[in-house]
Structure formats: structure tokens, C-alpha cells
Image: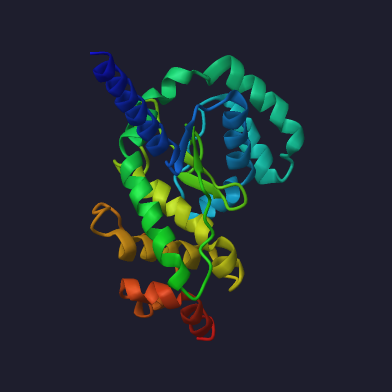
């Protein structure tokens, strides 16, 4: 009986270690939003409001006369860092509530296994490509109620994901579509986008085409936005074309 109990304890311990090991391998880290992060999202959105409107983005900001006045300042060119403390106070006292992100967090958590698989697939193939896909061991997902959809930091591996209080996301019902899109932005920001000095529209089209060609089975909702120069489409027709993306860009930019 003692031997059986000992074996049982060992088995449980090994199982526990395996579970911890599997959890630690996740490439997605979900973080609870903070007041500072939300204030930063609002500040950045207002700061770049003219660009977002020119590109036709749908913009999400709090409905308040204070925010409206800052938008006017931004369009006049008088908005800046000195406006951040007032935005922070506004977020802290009027709009911030951790409960507003609960449903969105649960949806992302439900798709972590899928996203891990897609990230690992990129990791297993990128060494065969003629360009460098920059990757991070972990991608930190930060939620926001404000902005234009999704954004990324190619230096930190962070992804800011727009949601609402009902846990819905812009463009897609499943958040994996947007998160993988932003991870692709991070991967090609320096080696493709900046190296070839691509415009915003072309950048978005190449990222969309990459995700569609790589994961159209796993992400059946994913679609290519109507942005950028459609001439790139003739160069990127199948997944194998991703492997020679740098050569494709050299030819494309010469057109």
C-alpha cells in the first residue's frame, strides 16, 4: 500500500510538472490593462488622429467634451506630451474599470492553443526564407477600448488589441485573426517594410497576404483588406512565394 501511494504521488508530480511545462511554452501572454496603458492609447490615437482619418480608419475614443477638445488641439498642431497627465486623470476618474475587459480576455484565452500552433509553424519555416522574420519567445497582448483596431511594437513584441465592453473585436469575431496579423507586422517590420521603404498601404497588403497564404485553413475568416498596390498580388500567389519575399520586394519596388 505504501509503495502504491508513493507511485501515485510520483505520477501526480510528473503530471503537474508536465502541465507547468506546457503552460510555460505558451507564446502568448495576456496582461490586464492599466490606467496608464489606456491613457497612452487615447493619447496616441488623438496624436495621430489626422493620419487615421486620412487612411479611413474607424476611430474609437471616449465620448466626452474633454476628448473632443483634445482632438481639435491635435488637428491644429497644438496637442502634445503636456496633455497626457490630464488624459490620465480623465481615464482614472471617469472611464476605467477592469470588468470592461473580462469577456475579451476570456475569448483570447480560448484561442491560445491555436495561436501557439500558428506561431510555432512560422518559427519552424522561417529559416528557409530569404528574409528574417523577427520573433519573440513571448508576445504580450494588451487590451484597449480605444484606438483603431490593433497595433504592435516591433522592439518589444507587444500587441495592443482593440475590444469593447461586450468582448467584441474590430473586423473579426475571433481575436486570433488580429493577433496573428500584428505578429506578422512585428516579424517583417525591419527586414521587409523598413528595408524596402514600403508605404502604409503596401505594408498592410503584404501582411494580409502573408497571413492568408500561410493560414487560410486555420483562420478561415481572415481576409485581405482593400489597401495598397494590388500589383503585389501577382508576386504572392502561394505559400512558397513567402520564402522569396525579399527577392519579390526587390523586383516589386523597381516597377
Q: How is the image coloured?
A: rainbow
Residue nearer the viewer, 127 or 14? 14
Residue 209 visible somewhere in the drawing: yes
Residue nearer the viewer, 61 or 69? 61
| Rendered location of residue 75, percent (x, y) | 65, 45
| Rendered location of residue 77, percent (x, y) | 72, 46
Q: Is residue 163 above or below residue 221?
A: above
| Rendered location of residue 87, percent (x, y) | 65, 27
Q: Is residue 122 above or below residue 57?
A: below
Q: Is residue 94 above or below residue 108?
A: above
In the rendered view, does 245 fall on the left or right side of 199?
left
Q: Residue at x 29, y 23 (%)?
A: 7
Q: Residue at x 48, y 68 (%)?
A: 202
Q: Residue at x 52, y 28 (%)?
A: 33
Residue 230 visible somewhere in the drawing: no
| Rendered location of residue 188, percent (x, y) | 52, 63
Q: Residue at x 50, y 27 (%)?
A: 32
Amino acid at each position: 500500500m505504501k509503495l502504491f501511494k508513493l507511485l501515485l504521488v510520483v505520477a501526480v508530480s510528473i503530471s503537474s510538472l508536465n502541465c507547468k511545462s506546457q503552460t510555460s511554452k505558451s507564446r502568448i501572454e495576456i496582461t490586464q490593462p492599466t490606467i496608464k496603458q489606456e491613457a497612452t492609447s487615447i493619447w496616441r490615437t488623438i496624436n495621430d488622429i489626422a493620419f487615421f482619418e486620412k487612411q479611413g480608419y474607424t476611430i474609437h475614443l471616449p465620448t466626452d467634451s474633454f476628448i473632443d477638445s483634445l482632438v481639435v488641439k491635435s488637428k491644429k498642431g497644438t496637442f502634445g506630451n503636456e496633455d497626457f497627465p490630464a488624459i490620465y486623470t480623465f481615464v482614472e476618474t471617469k472611464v476605467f474599470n477592469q470588468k470592461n475587459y473580462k469577456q475579451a480576455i476570456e475569448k483570447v484565452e480560448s484561442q491560445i492553443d491555436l495561436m501557439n500552433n500558428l506561431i510555432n509553424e512560422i518559427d519552424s519555416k522561417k529559416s528557409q526564407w530569404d528574409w528574417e522574420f523577427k520573433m519573440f519567445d513571448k508576445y504580450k497582448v494588451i487590451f484597449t477600448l480605444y484606438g483603431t483596431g490593433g497595433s504592435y511594437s516591433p522592439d518589444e513584441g507587444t500587441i495592443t488589441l482593440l475590444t469593447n465592453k461586450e468582448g467584441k473585436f474590430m473586423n473579426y469575431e475571433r481575436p486570433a485573426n488580429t493577433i496573428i496579423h500584428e505578429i506578422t507586422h512585428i516579424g517583417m517590420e525591419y527586414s521587409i517594410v523598413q528595408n524596402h521603404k514600403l508605404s502604409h498601404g503596401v505594408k498592410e497588403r503584404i501582411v494580409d497576404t502573408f497571413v492568408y497564404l500561410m493560414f487560410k485553413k486555420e483562420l478561415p475568416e481572415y481576409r485581405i483588406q482593400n489597401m495598397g498596390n494590388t500589383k503585389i498580388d501577382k508576386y504572392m500567389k502561394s505559400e512558397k512565394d513567402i520564402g522569396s519575399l525579399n527577392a519579390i520586394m526587390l523586383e516589386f519596388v523597381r516597377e
